[in-house]
Amino acid sequence: MELPRRARGDELLAPGAMSAMRARLRHLSEKNDLTTVIAHAFDHRTRLLPFIYADTRMAPAGVRAIGSALFDCGFEKTRIVLQEWNRNFSPQHMRLNGRIPDLFLVSSMHLHVAECNRLVREACRIDHDKRPLIIVGGPMIRYEPWHVFSTDPADSWGADIAVTGEEYVFLNLLDVLLSMRARGEPMRSVFERARGSGALDGIPGIVYANKTSPEGPTEELVDTGVQRLLGDLDELPHPYFGYRLLEAPGNDHELALKPLSFDMVRKVSPVSSIMMTAGCKFRCSYCPIPAYNQSQFRAKSGERIAEEIHQISHAFGITTFFSTDDNFFNNTKRTMDIVETLAARVRMGRPFSKIRLGSEVTVHDTVRMREHLPVIRDAGFAALWLGVEDMTATLVKKAQDKDKTLLAFQLLRENNILPMPMMMHHDSQPLVTWKSNYGLINQVRALRKAGATSMQVMMLTPAPGSKWYENVFDSGLAFKSAGGTAAEPYIYDGNYVVASKHPRPWLKQLNMLLAYTYFYNPVRLLGSLVFSKTTNVFPSKETRPEIETRRYSATKKLSRFIGRKAKAHIVDALSQIAGMWGLFHTYRRTIPWGWRLLRGKIERHDHSPVSPIPMRGVDGKAADHALPGTLNLKQKKRPAAPAIPDKELARAG
């Protein structure tokens, strides 16, 4: 299911293309008074470990990026609504500046498709002559855009356009529509004219609905192909603008008169996501990232990142940042450009001396970067999430093993960086083994001993856009239902066993809970107050400006030393408390599914999910975002094959 790659040399936009697009739209914004509401779909049933804190305390980067792009181009009448904070928000009741918005945008992950579709359905119930143009994007749409289009003639809801690419694709679409728009013309009317004239077909990265009547069902989806990627990420609008557009948390159906005030941003979103790099050199079969990035590695410059952090910190008081990298250590030269710039800013004093950063890396690259770890810590990186996956490399091979993993943890702790492991459980891995590190508990124990203060344990789940995705369904590994309960998209987060060849899959579900319980429990909480895994948190001399350290007396320095040592124990204890709180919710949500796996009949998929709506590319070409087996208008729907009984699959191995 990996996305096809564009022709060699055609993967990236021409340098300056994004800047030129932003300039054109600023000119068009003077003649087009647009109002826009951007909604981030969120299903609250997904709130469990390891995401239960960050999911509501960090405003998502994607919707902020789109909001920032609109604001930067002059469309300041924009509001961003997060369902994490506004679960009762209803598109039918939305009014911005006293009117129904011209554009309604929705961003969604695959997990949140139920809420995404609800938002789109409600927006479609607005009177036809007043309904906004509905555009949907986000991680789900990148790989499976058909989810937001209905085929039911009795309920013909659906988005008008699905954007399968990044900010440039959306701005390109807006540029085409506004260039055709007559004064005061509804945006849906412009879209219908653009669709009929073929003007949309020259915008790579969108899928739109082909209909014979505006209110009829979608008969066909037209796919304009894979996007061209922005090569120079410094051309992106500043993410600072997105924070100015956030809707305040509330329980109302309607929008507030004003966005969230500046002084409230830090209170509701104390952690800021920030984009530094994109892409990864590894080609894991379960991961869609390399294909999505067309084997490109992109990064912002160190100066640009420093500027973004300064703007957000100065305006909103946020000092904790999480970088949404795929592999921050992927390219040494680009990584060092970023960290050396940030380290230089830290030595200059506040606000950078107060900044704390986190990102994602691999074990292999952490060991490779060992000589650079001191300056990485000086740059403010206080925690790194490592893709340990499996210490024995039985499931995933990314040049890691037990010795290299423990060495990576040791190196990070020696440089005052918290190692945060991310692990994957699999069918052949037992819960405990004797005199080896193959068992799940054995690995959790080893990582805790090596200095882990948090833990992520997940079951391998079919990810749309990955090499592995189609095979998991076609081979019968993926569950369709258990005990009469369908395996809905919201449980495809790795916390539920939804694909397994194990004869007793409920054991895998139980193993993950036991692993979490082994790591997060009252005994470890008490132990962390005495034998903390974060005692080595004291920064090197270079982390604080020399002028700042000189002014403290010996007594003051001693009190600061004691205070920081006490803080180290408190950090570990708080991690345990947060983990136990999240574990409670994980138990109550996943145990019912485990019971169904134990007592109920398991039905399995016999083929990968494909679009129920025919899809085609431009000029009759094959659709790039369609899975094999997707129909075109000339084909009839294939009959569904009978489900494979669980016992027969187990006997077949």
Image (spheres, rainbow, N blue to C red):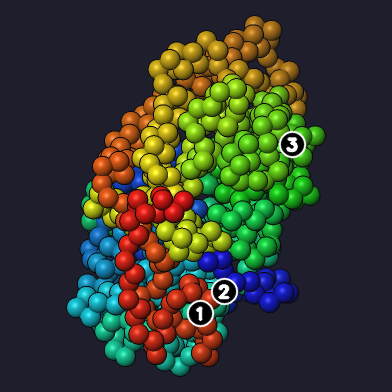
**Can you identify the residue that label 3 sits on?**
367
Circles 3 and 2: CB atoms closer than 8 Å: no
> Which residue is outermost to the left?
154
Query: Marks 3 and 2, Cα distance to the nearest angstrom?
Result: 35 Å
Asked if residue 589 lies left or right of residue 390, the reply is left
Question: Callout 2: few (<14), some (14-19), or many (20+) C-alpha neighbours within 10 Å?
Answer: many
Which numbered disc, 3 or 1, marks the residue that appears first in the sequence? Answer: 3
Question: Callout 1: few (<14), some (14-19), or many (20+) C-alpha neighbours within 10 Å?
Answer: many
- Work out whether residue 34 can be spotted: no
Task: Give how far across and how far down residue 122 sits, in percent.
Answer: 24, 67
Helix, strand, or loop for circle 3? helix
**Can you identify the residue that label 2 sits on?**
226
Q: Which mark is residue 258?
A: none
Task: Choose mark 1 or mark 2, whichever is in front.
Answer: 1
Query: Marks 1 and 2, Cα distance to the nearest angstrom?
Result: 9 Å
> Image quadrant of residue 544?
top right
Helix, strand, or loop for circle 1? loop
> Which residue is outermost to the front?
651
Q: Amino acid at mark 3?
A: Val
> Image quadrant of residue 639?
bottom left
- Work out whether residue 443 can be spotted: yes
Task: Give how far across and how far down residue 400 sits, in percent.
Answer: 68, 39
**Can you identify the residue that label 1 sits on?**
623
Q: Residue at x 39, y 73 (%)?
A: 611
